[in-house]
């Protein structure tokens, strides 16, 4: 029986409440650049409960002026930072490969960041100082909504897109992580933190360990999330290390690759992820799930199919056919075209699913026979779909 995380279930059921915008009868709205010249100036002028709205456009490291000690933008606790449209394509913050883009230190759960593309972050220091090129969270629990982390890089450190450490149990919802790279956690890395990852998409991220996500002593709930064409030496989609026990509910892993171990997931250091109603399919390199001798993975109502180096092998050997698990073509609609839903005749749709509920991140999003054949595509093609 797969472990069910109460925290994960409550989050998925009540995420509308969690994502409600902060309100205050005394709150002030500050506009950038019409009232304050830079994003940082807007944040510095704000108090807890205030909203800083950034007009649509591109804001660069050079154009924003001198960066703070830790990043181009340093958040304040309780401030709501919002792009004008609330969508990622409205406002771009470009680090121009000069350093970290956003830093959150001691920001509580009333802090909110919404509607930005965060790109061009680059860090070269090893270890904690060089982690989180796009965004670093330290002892912080903000909500990050409808943001895109694109082409951020850490060298010899973790979290190309985002890094969470020191109990940074943030919420990431409706976010995209694409083309980020790091030594571990190409898209997102976490250490002693369990951020909630809801309805997010990880596309073409890369790392030595954990192409999309790397967990160190962390157990994040991950729900309704897509992992596509991420790559790593170990853990193409997800790597779990040091007693990490993430709960995955309705995720889709498609076409991820690992040069050595676990195209979808790799577990080490007494880690034990639990997967429910999740697809792991189509890996061109590496078996679906792999573990070291101290770790295990439990799957319930999952479909593991078409992974070049093996499906129900390694630490999930023997789970096929039990716990409502299957090994059938999920009939994903068109992953190369950005459609990760299933066809109506998919064995993962609720009418055919062995557990009576849909398996995978998305429901029907094409008609029978319309799904595209699984085939490799270029990263430039994928990026163009999310600009």
Image (spheres, rainbow, N blue to C red):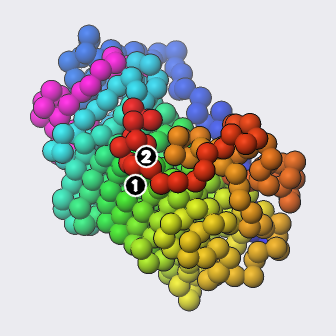
* Callout 1: SS: loop
Task: Please indicate, yes or no, whether residue 228 appears anywhere in the rendered image.
Answer: yes
Along the line of sight, the residue nearer the viewer: 76 or 283: 283
Q: Is residue 61 left or right of residue 337?
A: left
Q: Is residue 80 magenta?
A: no
Q: Position of residue 340 (x, y in %)?
A: 61, 45
Q: Is residue 375 above or below residue 232?
A: above
Identify which residue is drawn at 53% across, 26% down: 22
Instruction: Residue 199: name its quadrant.
Output: top right
The quadrant of the rendering that contains the N terminus is bottom right
Q: Left or right: 284 with respect to 208?
A: right
Image quadrant occupied by the C terminus:
top left
Residue 59 belongs to magenta span: yes
* Vertical placement of residue 59 versus 339, above or below: above
- Tags 1 and 2 in contact by the CB under 8 Å rule? yes
User: Is 384 displayed left or right of 121 in the figure?
Assistant: right
Q: Which residue is mark 2?
A: 177
Question: Where does the magenta region start and end?
Answer: 50-73
Could one spot residue 239 in this view of the protein? no
- For label 2, count other residues whose C-alpha is less than 10 Å away and answer few (under 14), some (14-19) or many (20+): many
Q: Secondary structure at mark 2?
A: strand
Apparent side of residue 22 relative to residue 105 in the rendered image (left or right): right
Q: Position of residue 336 (x, y in %)?
A: 52, 46
| Residue for badge 1 | 205
- Residue at position x 87%, y 48% in the image: 351
> Which quarter of the figure has residue 283?
bottom right
């Amino acid at each position: 029986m797969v472990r069910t995380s109460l925290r994960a279930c409550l989050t998925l059921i009540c995420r509308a409440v969690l994502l409600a915008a902060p309100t205050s009868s005394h709150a002030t709205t500050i506009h950038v650049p019409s009232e304050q010249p830079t994003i940082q100036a807007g944040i510095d002028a704000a108090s807890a409960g205030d909203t800083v709205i950034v007009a649509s456009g591109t804001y660069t490291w050079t154009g924003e002026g001198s960066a703070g000690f830790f990043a181009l933008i340093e958040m304040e606790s309780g401030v709501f930072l919002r792009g004008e449209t609330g969508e990622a394509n409205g406002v771009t913050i470009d680090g121009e490969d000069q350093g970290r883009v956003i830093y959150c230190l001691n920001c509580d759960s009333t802090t909110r960041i919404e509607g930005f593309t965060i790109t061009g972050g680059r860090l070269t220091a090893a270890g904690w100082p060089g982690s989180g090129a796009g965004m670093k969270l330290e002892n912080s629990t903000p909500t990050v909504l409808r943001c895109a982390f694109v082409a951020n890089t850490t060298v010899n450190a973790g979290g190309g897109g985002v890094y969470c450490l020191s109990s940074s149990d943030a919420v990431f919802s409706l976010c995209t992580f694409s083309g980020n790279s790091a030594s571990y956690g190409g898209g997102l890395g976490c250490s002693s933190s369990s951020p909630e990852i809801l309805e997010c998409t990880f596309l073409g991220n890369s790392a030595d360990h954990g192409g999309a996500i790397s967990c160190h002593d962390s157990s994040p709930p991950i729900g309704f999330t897509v992992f596509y064409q991420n790559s790593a030496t170990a853990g193409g989609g997800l790597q779990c290390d040091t007693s990490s026990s993430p709960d995955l509910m309705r995720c889709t892993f498609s076409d991820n690759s690992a040069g050595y171990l676990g195209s979808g997931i790799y577990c080490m250091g007494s880690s034990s992820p639990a997967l429910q109603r999740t697809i792991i399919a189509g890996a061109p390199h590496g078996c679906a799930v792999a573990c070291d001798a101290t770790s295990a993975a439990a799957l319930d109502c999952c479909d593991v199919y078409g992974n070049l180096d093996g499906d129900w092998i390694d630490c999930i050997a023997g789970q096929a056919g039990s716990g409502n698990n299957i090994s059938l073509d999920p009939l994903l609609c068109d992953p190369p075209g950005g459609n990760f839903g299933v066809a109506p005749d998919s064995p993962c749709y609720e009418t055919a699913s062995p557990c009576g509920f849909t398996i995978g991140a998305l429901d029907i999003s094409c008609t029978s026979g319309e799904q595209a054949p699984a085939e490799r595509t270029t990263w430039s093609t994928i990026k163009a779909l999310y600009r």
